[in-house]
């Protein structure tokens, strides 16, 4: 798989290979394009870039991260067996490259599997389960304004896609998370291609990389709104759309 192959081709210098706990990481005051503060007694993450990206690997009760926030990639082996729950001021997009991810979101257990994409509501208190996850994933943190522009921006789309985008945005503010599952092979290829280019641009940081990355983010959102089925977290008013194309007759 292209995304996995890209990860394993990235060279990591020994001096950029870190091993520490989350508490030690915060004490170092390191900026991985987001910082952690305490707000109302809870861990709160604040983004420092419009877009930031990382790989995460959950394997046999252990978590490793690969960050691209600095000039050189930084590989972090986290020494914790459990993560601290947090909320944030940004949107989190996770693409499951392989395996399965388990996340505790506001007391609800959510599971995501290979090729699924999940968005976590920024204000939902959540944490990934190191013990109950076994996966490789791409994690993209997106400024809320950038996310809204990418999903509702003025691009050429069909009335059906416009309806879906507005519908998804409305529910994304009310629900804890959104889950996207591919229904078309060609759209899966498009998603992976967009993610690959976003990773490459942010990793290499050439002039204009952020604007180019935002362009690929818009393309990714366009693919999601036309070739993926989506569902929302279970609340008092559950909503699931099993096949986006069934709506076309009513638009």
Image (spheres, rainbow, N blue to C red):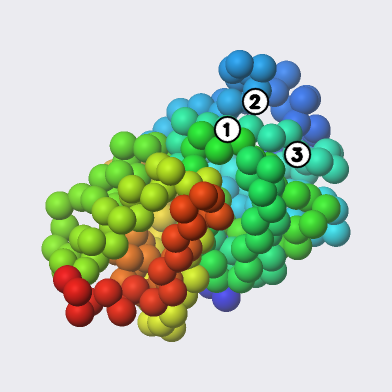
Vertical placement of residue 97 versus 73, above or below: below
| Residue drawn at x 31%, y 56% as measured from the top left | 167
| Residue on which the image places disc 2 | 43
Height in image: 205 above or below 223? above
Q: Earlier in the sequence, mark 1 or mark 2?
A: 2
The one nearer the camera, 75 or 141, is 141
* Residue 222 x/y as whole percent: 29, 64
Disc number placed over residue 87 in the picture, else none: 1
Q: How far apart are labels 1 and 2 at the CA level?
A: 7 Å
User: Is disc 3 surrounded by few (<14), some (14 to 19) or many (20+) residues within 10 Å?
Assistant: some
Q: Which mark is residue 64?
A: none
The alpha-carbon separation of the residues under discs 1 and 3 comes to 13 Å
- Of helix, strand and loop, which one carries label 2? strand
Q: Camera-side residue: 44 or 111?
A: 111
Left or right: 28 as drawn, with respect to 80: left
- CB contact under 8 Å: marks 1 and 2: yes
Number of numbered callouts drawn: 3
Q: Where residue 83 appears, x then y in whole percent?
A: 75, 39
- Residue at 49%, 57% (x, y): give it: 238
Kindly indicate the quadrant of the structure image that contains residue 14.
top right
Task: Residue at 61% x, 16% y: name it.
Answer: 40
What's the mark number on residue 83? 3
Q: CA distance from mark 2 to mark 3?
A: 11 Å
Of callouts 2 and 3, the N-terminal one: 2
Assign a secondary structure to mark 1: strand
Identity of the residue drawn at 37% across and 65% down: 224
Task: State the image coordinates of residue 68 (x, y, percent, origin top left).
Answer: 54, 43
Depth check: 64 or 152 in front? 152
Q: Are marks 2 and 3 in contact (CB under 8 Å)?
A: no
- Check disc 3 and report its element: helix, strand or loop: loop
């Amino acid at each position: 798989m292209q995304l996995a192959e890209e990860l394993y081709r990235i060279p990591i210098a020994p001096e950029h290979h870190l091993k520490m706990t989350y508490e030690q990481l915060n004490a170092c005051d390191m900026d991985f394009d987001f910082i952690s503060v305490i707000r109302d007694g809870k861990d709160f993450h604040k983004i420092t870039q419009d877009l930031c990206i990382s790989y995460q690997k959950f394997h046999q009760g252990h978590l490793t991260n690969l960050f691209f926030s600095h000039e050189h990639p930084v590989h972090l082996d986290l020494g914790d067996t459990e993560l601290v729950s947090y909320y944030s001021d940004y949107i989190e997009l996770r693409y499951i490259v392989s395996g399965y991810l388990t996340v505790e979101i506001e007391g609800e257990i959510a599971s995501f599997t290979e090729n699924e994409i999940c968005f976590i509501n920024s204000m939902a208190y959540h944490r990934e389960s190191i013990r109950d996850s076994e996966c490789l994933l791409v994690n993209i943190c997106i400024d809320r304004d950038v996310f809204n522009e990418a999903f509702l921006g003025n691009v050429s789309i069909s009335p059906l896609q416009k309806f879906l985008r507005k519908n998804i945005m409305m529910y994304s503010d009310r629900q804890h998370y959104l889950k996207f599952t591919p229904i078309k092979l060609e759209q899966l290829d498009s998603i992976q291609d967009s993610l690959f280019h976003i990773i490459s641009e942010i990793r290499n940081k050439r002039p204009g990389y952020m604007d180019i990355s935002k362009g690929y983010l818009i393309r990714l959102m366009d693919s999601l709104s036309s070739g993926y089925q989506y569902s929302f977290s279970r609340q008092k008013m559950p909503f699931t759309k099993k096949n986006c194309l069934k709506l076309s007759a009513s638009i």
